[in-house]
Amino acid sequence: MKLLVVGSGGREHALAWKLAQSPRVQLVYVAPGNGGTAQDVRLRNLAITDLNELADFVEKEQIALTLVGPEQPLAAGIVNLFRSRGLKIFGPSKEAAQLESSKDFAKAFMKRHAIPTAEYETFADVASAHAYIDSKGAPIVIKADGLAAGKGVVVATTLEEAHHAVDMMLSDNKLGDAGARVVIEEFLAGEEASFIVMVDGINVLPLASSQDHKRLLDEDHGPNTGGMGAYSPAPIVTPQLHARVMREIILPTVRGMEKEGIRFTGFLYAGLMIDAHGNPKTLEFNCRMGDPETQPIMARLKGDFSKVVEQAIAGTLDTVELEWDRRTALGVVLAAHNYPDAPRKGDLISGVPPETGDAVTFHAGTTLTDDRLTTSGGRVLCVVGLADSVRSAQSVAYETINHISFDGMQYRRDIGFRAVNRKHG
Ligand code: AMP
Ligand code: GLY
């Protein structure tokens, strides 16, 4: 059968790579794809971005099922459109995607269903927002209500920063409609983890745990990025914490959506903050897989993923049991010069080694033109190493990176440091 993955990042490369391993899968189209998906003979890039044209293509080519990577097409209603045309697709409807596309929707939903999260208020009025900040003090967190491609959250350590963030979003309209309303919430201290599950409307199938590294520089310094690396499993997610997150966060969310008449289907990603006592709170929901978390997660997943997606679309996830490689998978993102502000494009990439049993490189911001591989985005590659410990997985990943070069390449040297410290600290 033929499949379609929508998107162009490292997440989509990893999803397509995994799907293509199935003996029943002939070809995986990736729309629009990247330089890495262009190089793999089992994958084919598709230069269609318009959702109606994509649906036409799926119909014409008799594509068995579609998997959506990024949030934008989900928020734009790709699932509603495909379903209305009788096409099989895994992802949330536009309405269900509000868990990610509107922070206010997500916060109000969590409040209604007593799902642990930071205290908050939502504002459209500048003066009231400033007054609220003054009444609460710093640190405090300001979030644009809508999708802002990772630029919508300001963790303000001073009142000045907080007021400035409100002005930027509400008065200066720097984020457009996405910042027309802001959520202002309590600052939560602790360690983050990514908790991702597949949902078929009723049944919930947890994927392996993972942890992202959002800051640009080592030891979590520098600006926030889309993610500079991730590894799986994340030892902070103990079996006890796992059970608690399912009971207190994931299941109430899926049941709550059902009760409100917006059945959730798709990947549900709860970004967690776990405090010093091990209590989890929800920082945010995403209605898709994480990037770069998908890269190490897919590297560890065993078995036929196309069958899992098929069951998810059929509503029979309760019959699925996932099997995971027991090793740790650790992915390091290689970013372009000047990422995340204004990443430079067009640098020639060399030395990407072929996949081995313990290392695989997923592409994100790359373009292949006549055998020349060049950078075309902020996050360029994600190199994943697999090994029996986090330290060894680091060694494999960083050893692989030594072969790769492009001008301006920047990456963190400490991906996985929290897990390493946990074991040795
Ligand atoms: P979000 O898009 O809501 O996940 O926010 C992006 C990042 O900002 C998170 O991964 C956290 O590192 C940080 N963050 C968000 N909300 C809070 C909060 N209430 N307290 C502390 N840090 C936060
Ligand atoms: N890695 C964070 C995200 O995908 O939102």
Image (cartoon, rainbow, N blue to C red):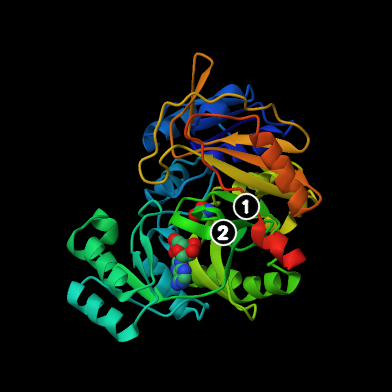
* Residue 380, label in figure: none
Left-right relation of 143 to 212? left
Near-viewer residue (283 or 263)? 283
* Residue 414, label in figure: 1
The x and y percentages for residue 402 are 65, 33
Near-viewer residue (332 or 201)? 332
Dot 1: what SS?
Answer: loop
Q: Which callout, 2 or 1, points at the residue further toward the start of the chain?
A: 2
**Disc 2, disc 1: CB below 8 Å?**
yes
Q: Can residue 198 be seen in this view?
A: no
Near-viewer residue (324 or 75)? 324
**In the rendered image, which quarter is residue 422 located in?**
bottom right
In the rendered image, the vertical position of residue 140 relative to residue 350, given as above or below: below
Image quarter where the C terminus lies is bottom right
Q: How crowded is mark 1: few (under 14 residues within 10 Å), some or many (20 or more)?
A: some
The answer to whether the beta carbon of the residue marked 2 is less than 8 Å from any atom of ligand 1 is no
The x and y percentages for residue 92 are 49, 54
The answer to whether the beta carbon of the residue marked 1 is less than 8 Å from any atom of ligand 1 is no
Distance of label 2 from label 1 (alpha carbons) = 7 Å
Amino acid carrying mark 2 in the image: Glu
In the rendered image, the vertical position of residue 114 relative to residue 209, given as above or below: below
Residue picked out by circle 2: 219
**In the rendered image, which quarter is residue 179 located in?**
bottom left
Residue at the far bottom in the pictured view: 135
Dot 2: what SS?
Answer: helix
Residue at the far top in the pictured view: 370
**In the rendered image, which quarter is residue 318 located in?**
bottom right
Image quarter where the N terminus lies is top right
Residue at the image position 47 percent from the left and 50 percent from the top: 226
Left-right relation of 352 to 283? right
In the rendered image, the vertical position of residue 73 relative to residue 97, given as above or below: above
